[in-house]
């Protein structure tokens, strides 16, 4: 379609969105969270002081083509070592990125080089120039004092907390955004938030000051793609409209043009979701975007929904988008 699209998030949710968006436009910029502190990413972050590479690696893999080259390199960077040695648990793509950064000293240059090697559609950028720590304020951790709010630190811990996440902040509090990410947001035609882990992948972008300013001031239209199901731990028990209420709480000045949700996932709560979308000044678009398992997004169906919204077929229409491939 020739549109400039920026997608923000991390992990499997952003990967699903990117796999759909590369079917819609070649001009994609993924802006990826850099707060992961678990697994292979956490080990490399602690040992070398680099940005956690895991979410960036997944974004690169999602933007690989469907040809033999793309499918092969996607498998290569996603390959994870087994066994019990020092390499156990590391993803090959994480090691490749860490090596590029160590060699060239520039995270953006390293990502661009790997992107060219993989022949990806678009570009992958980190949202901040330094590794970040997520600090969540969580209630319900003490069954004897369910309303007491306590701090939970680190993306890995927040993602599996047994309490109810109320809000998050970042440390450092005023992290520097990557200039290329800010420029991409300001130049975009559409900015897409989500789907993904709400507190650890989607909301952190709104807490990087210069990136948040760009997101509020860009002339791009903004779309929020909602999750299909709540995430155990992080958003346990969240309804679709609760996701939007939390988004509003963290970015009260942000307005959105379209909220895209799966028709089946709404589960009869369409009116509540319309009201929550109204808090963001957004219109609600419902479409069949789930895969057969109802848990993951189908990239072809999601691409069809993006294509129709971007093309104005269902732009600012509250209702259902027919399935179209």
Image (cartoon, helix red, strand yellow):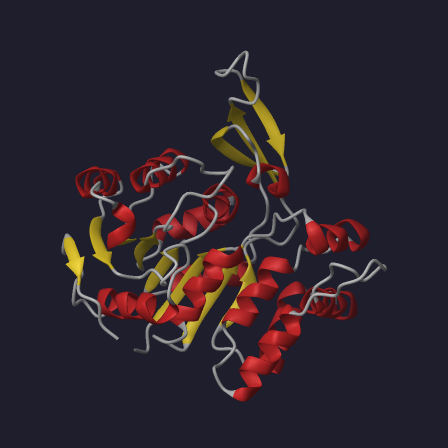
Q: Residue 294's x, y, as percent?
A: 36, 56
Q: Is residue 20 left or right of residue 65?
A: left
Residue, x 81% and y 52% (percent of image)? 47
Q: Residue 147's x, y, as percent?
A: 48, 16
Q: Is residue 130 left or right of residue 29?
A: right
Quadrant containing the C terminus is: bottom left
- Residue furthest to the top in view is 144
Q: Quadrant of residue 61?
A: bottom right
> Total marks drawn?
0
Residue, x 33% and y 73% (percent of image)? 3
Q: Residue 64's x, y, as percent?
A: 52, 77
Q: Is residue 94 left or right of residue 2?
A: right
One can see residue 51 in this view: yes
- Residue furthest to the bottom in view is 68
Q: Residue 297's x, y, as percent?
A: 38, 61
Residue 5 vertical placement versus 126 (above, below):
below
Residue, x 30% and y 49% (percent of image)? 265
176 or 157: which is nearer to us?
A: 157
Residue 287 vertical placement versus 69 (above, below):
above
Quadrant containing the N terminus is: bottom left
140 or 109: which is nearer to us?
A: 140
- Residue furthest to the front in view is 293
Residue, x 62% and y 66% (percent of image)? 108
One can see residue 259 in this view: no
């Amino acid at each position: 379609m020739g549109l400039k699209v920026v997608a923000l998030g991390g992990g499997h949710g952003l990967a699903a969105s990117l796999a759909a968006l590369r079917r819609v436009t070649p001009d994609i910029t993924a802006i990826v969270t850099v707060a992961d502190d678990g697994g292979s990413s956490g080990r490399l972050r602690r040992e070398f002081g680099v940005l956690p590479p895991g979410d960036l690696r997944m974004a690169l893999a999602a933007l690989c083509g469907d040809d033999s080259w793309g499918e092969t390199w996607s498998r290569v960077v996603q390959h994870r070592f087994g066994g019990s040695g020092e390499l156990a648990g590391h993803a090959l793509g994480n090691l490749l990125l860490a090596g590029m950064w160590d060699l060239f000293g520039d995270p953006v240059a390293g990502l661009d080089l790997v992107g060219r090697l993989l022949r990806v559609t678009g570009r992958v950028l980190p949202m901040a120039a330094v590794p970040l720590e997520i600090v969540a304020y969580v209630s319900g951790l003490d069954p004897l004092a369910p309303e007491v709010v306590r701090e939970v630190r680190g993306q890995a811990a927040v993602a599996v907390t047994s309490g109810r996440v109320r809000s998050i902040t970042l440390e450092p509090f005023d992290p520097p955004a990557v200039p290329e990410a800010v420029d991409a947001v300001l130049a975009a035609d559409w900015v897409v938030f989500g789907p993904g882990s709400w507190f650890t992948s989607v909301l952190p972008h709104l807490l990087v000051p210069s990136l948040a300013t760009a997101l509020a001031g860009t002339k791009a239209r903004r779309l929020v793609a909602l999750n299909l199901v709540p995430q155990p731990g992080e958003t346990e028990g969240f309804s679709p409209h609760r996701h939007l209420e939390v988004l509003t709480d963290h970015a009260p000045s942000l307005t959105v043009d379209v909220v895209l949700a799966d028709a089946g996932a709404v589960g009869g709560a369409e009116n509540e979701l319309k009201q929550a979308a109204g808090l963001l000044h957004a219109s609600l678009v419902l479409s069949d975007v789930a895969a057969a398992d109802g848990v993951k997004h189908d990239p072809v169906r999601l691409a069809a929904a993006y294509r129709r919204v971007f093309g104005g077929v269902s732009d600012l229409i509250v209702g259902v988008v027919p399935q179209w491939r």
